[in-house]
């Protein structure tokens, strides 16, 4: 599958659609999810064009990978989540219910999150 430049996160990164920004650096944009699944629900999005976790993990440069890893605790601290805890989720593909085909991590916290997967 080819990367689609018109997906909604590509438009947010290009500044064509607004977002509630939490953090930005050269490689990363983080913003609040429009339909939060926890008290705090932020999306941590590499700016480069990768479709999913699978694509990113296989193709990204070391500096892109490092930037993403570092952004997680930076954003968590900005939101005051590091003491009580938080969860990171990456959905890849159909079975994981990935809706937006631009790689992103979900950062969830602010309240007890319950079991990892509910059936
Ligand atoms: P996923 O199913 O992993 O692809 O998650 C996509 C997430 O993007 C969902 O949690 C949506 O609520 C969220 N989302 C979709 N459009 C927007 C938007 N314009 N701003 C912020 N979050 C969005």
Image: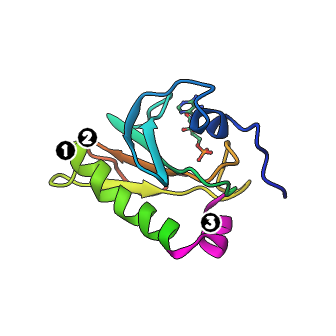
- Residue at figure coordinates x 20%, y 54% from the top left: 82
> In the image shown, does 94 or 101 lie closer to the viewer?
101
Task: Return the residue at label 2.
Answer: 110
Reading the chain from its start, which is encountered first: label 2 or label 1? Answer: 1
Q: Tell me residue 101's x, y (percent).
A: 70, 48
Q: Is residue 35 positioned above or below 100 on the image? A: above
Mark 3 Cα within 10 Å, few/some/many (few <14, many 20+)? some
Mark 2 Cα within 10 Å, few/some/many (few <14, many 20+)? some
Q: Nearer the viewer, mark 2 or mark 3?
A: 3
Instruction: Give the left or right position of residue 86, taking residue 55 as reference.
Output: left
Q: Disc 1 to disc 3, how far (Cα)?
A: 27 Å
Task: Return the residue at label 1.
Answer: 80
In the drawing, what numbered circle is on residue 55?
Answer: none
Q: Tell me residue 69's x, y (percent).
A: 40, 65
Q: Tell me residue 65's x, y (percent).
A: 49, 69
Q: Is mark 2 on a helix, strand or loop?
A: loop
Task: Return the residue at label 3.
Answer: 56
Q: Disc 2 to disc 1, how far (Cα)?
A: 8 Å
Residue segment shown in magenta: 52-62
Query: Quarter containing ligand 1?
Result: top right
Reading the chain from its start, which is encountered first: label 2 or label 3? Answer: 3
């Amino acid at each position: 599958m080819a990367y689609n430049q018109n997906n909604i996160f590509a438009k947010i990164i290009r500044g064509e659609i607004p977002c509630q920004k939490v953090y930005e650096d050269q490689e990363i944009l983080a913003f609040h999810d429009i339909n939060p699944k926890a008290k705090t629900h932020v999306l941590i999005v590499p700016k480069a064009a990768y479709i999913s976790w699978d694509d990113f993990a296989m193709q990204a440069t070391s500096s892109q990978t490092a930037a993403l890893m570092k952004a997680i605790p930076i954003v968590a601290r900005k939101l005051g989540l590091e003491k009580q805890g938080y969860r990171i989720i990456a959905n890849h593909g159909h079975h994981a219910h990935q809706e937006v085909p631009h790689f992103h991590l979900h950062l969830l916290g602010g309240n007890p999150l319950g079991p990892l997967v509910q059936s």
